[in-house]
Amino acid sequence: MSEEINGRRAFLTAAALGGGAAVLVGGATAAVAQTASAPGTLQAIRDRGELRIAVAPGEPWFYKDQRSGEWYGLGWGVGVALAKELGIKATPVETTWGTAIAGLQAGQFDVMFTMDATPQRALAADFPVQPMFYYAQGVLLKDGVTVSTWEEMNKPEFKIGVVLGTSPDRDITVRLPKATIERFPSADETGAAFVAGRMDAISLFHPALVMLQSKVKRGSIVLPEPIRQSPSSAGVPNQADKSWRDWLGLSMDYLYQTGQTQKIFDEYLTYRGIDASKVPAIMRERWTKA
């Protein structure tokens, strides 16, 4: 088993470094050497012996057990798995969602998982080509309400709640122009209004809906057709040497394709007392399967 793991580590590292070398062909040897030793590159991370992972409270991505001080969640779990592939330790570096990009620029950490790639973020940070996983825009339906398509909700008498300024808010505004849309500052406030019976549904990306449903203890989650999917990614410092970014993308794809990312997500749901078998997958290939 150890030979298999070591062989896989060697393959992943060689593939990433080989890709970086191909890009640098024709450059000066001194420049290549300087870039290869730059802080935050793959070799620098391995030399340091630790992968510094940005963590910010927000389930199911990151969750800190206040009693033990240990971190859990999909983002942290994937980071731990990749640190093991490199043969180094995973070290959490606490940040906030609002300051994570600045932290990457300042070299405070090597990666922040579950950070979606957007045009604005890409101006300041770098992102692998391969997605980390997929989530879909879902709805949490009030008990007794049954819909399977977006069009069924597109009517004035259907009341749906969203978090103000989020991607689901922008999408719902266009997708359901006839529906009655209520906007709230946070997911918790949206959930409170749902519990009070003020709306027929809530729309968030489905992993967040799962955590909200576990709190409100009611309703059912569906992914209405046509499914509105979105890939999630991981942000890294934007540097000339792309070996770390490329290895990360190759490795995240490996975890996704082999089902390990899904397993990490399911294990976190179980840890939080949620039946993973009743939750929509984060592998889009499973969304159309019965």
Image (cartoon, grey):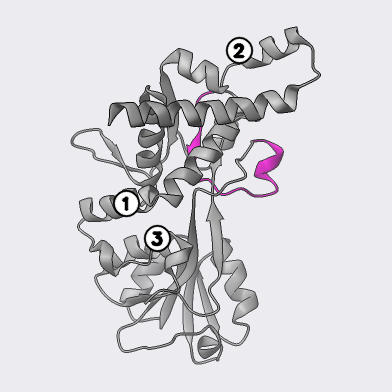
Question: Where does label 2 land, which residue?
Answer: 37
| Nearer-N-terminus badge (2/3) | 2
Residue occupying image coordinates x 76% and y 21%: 25
**Residue 58 in view in this figure:** no
Q: Name the quadrant of the C terminus.
A: bottom left
Q: Is 124 one of the magenta-colored residues?
A: yes
Residue occupying image coordinates x 67% and y 16%: 35
Residue 205 % position (x, y): 47, 64
- Inter-mark Cα distance, 2 to 3: 38 Å
Dot 3: few (<14), some (14–19), or many (≥20) neighbours within 10 Å? Answer: many
- The residue type indicated by label 1 comes to Lys
Q: Secondary structure at mark 2?
A: loop
| Nearer-N-terminus badge (1/3) | 3
Residue 144 % position (x, y): 31, 89
**Residue 25 in view in this figure:** yes
- The residue type indicated by label 2 comes to Ser
Q: Mark 1 and 3 residues: CB-CB less than 8 Å, in contact?
A: no
Residue occupying image coordinates x 61% and y 68%: 170
Give the magenta-colored segment's residue range: 108-125
| Nearer-N-terminus badge (2/1) | 2
Question: Does residue 111 lie above or below 119 as drawn?
Answer: above
Question: Does residue 186 lie above or below 174 as drawn?
Answer: above
Question: Where does label 3 land, which residue?
Answer: 207
Name the mark on residue 263.
1
Question: Does residue 269 lie above or below 96 as drawn?
Answer: below
- The residue type indicated by label 3 comes to Pro
Q: Is 123 one of the magenta-colored residues?
A: yes
Dot 1: few (<14), some (14–19), or many (≥20) neighbours within 10 Å? Answer: some
- Prevailing secondary structure class for the magenta stretch in the rendered image: loop
Q: Mark 2 and 3 residues: CB-CB less than 8 Å, in contact?
A: no
